[in-house]
Image (tube, rainbow, N blue to C red):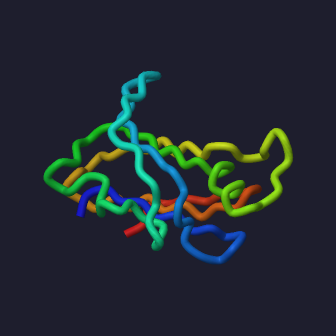
Amino acid sequence: MGLSTHVLDTMHGGPAAGMVAALYTTHGEVATLVKRFTLDADGRSPDGPLFDTASLKAGTYRLVFDVAGYFKARGVALPEPNFLNKVSLDFGIAQPEQNYHVPLLVSPWSYSTYRGS
């Protein structure tokens, strides 16, 4: 399956539809944008996997989620500065033939992630 992500809004109890996210490859301190996308109604990339199995390479990656922008668009009154602005997840792909799913559970004040199946 490759690399995929899914974001759940734990404040409202559903997918984070409309959240803007970006995927980067990383090499040390250098991050190169692969794609920017807006999550669909299910809180997933509208184009399916971010990389399919054939295109996924071993290496390091970063997913960045615009958490503050999403919650502001939902009408949530956030303090200035926001507690969470953008959530950045740096992770490695060691075995690109396997499936790597990177879910994010997020509210304006907390987040959790893990390697899903």
Residue that lies at the very extreme toward the bottom in this rendered image: 13
In the image, 55 versus 39, the foreground residue is: 39
Residue that lies at the very extreme toward the top in this rendered image: 29
Which percent across, then down, holds residue 100?
Answer: 34, 58
Looking at this view, name the residue that lies furthest to the right.
79
Left or right: residue 86 compared with residue 103: right
- Rendered location of residue 102, percent (x, y): 44, 58
On screen, residue 26 above or below 13 = above
Left or right? Give the position of 20 relative to 96: right
Judged left or right of residue 84, residue 21 is left
User: Which quarter of the image is occupied by the N terminus?
Assistant: bottom left
Q: Quadrant of the C terminus?
A: bottom left
User: Looking at the picture, how far across and down is residue 27, in whole percent?
Assistant: 37, 26
Identified at 48% across, 49% down, the residue is 21
What residue is shown at x 63% (from left), y 55% (from top)? 70
Res 97 quadrant in image: bottom left
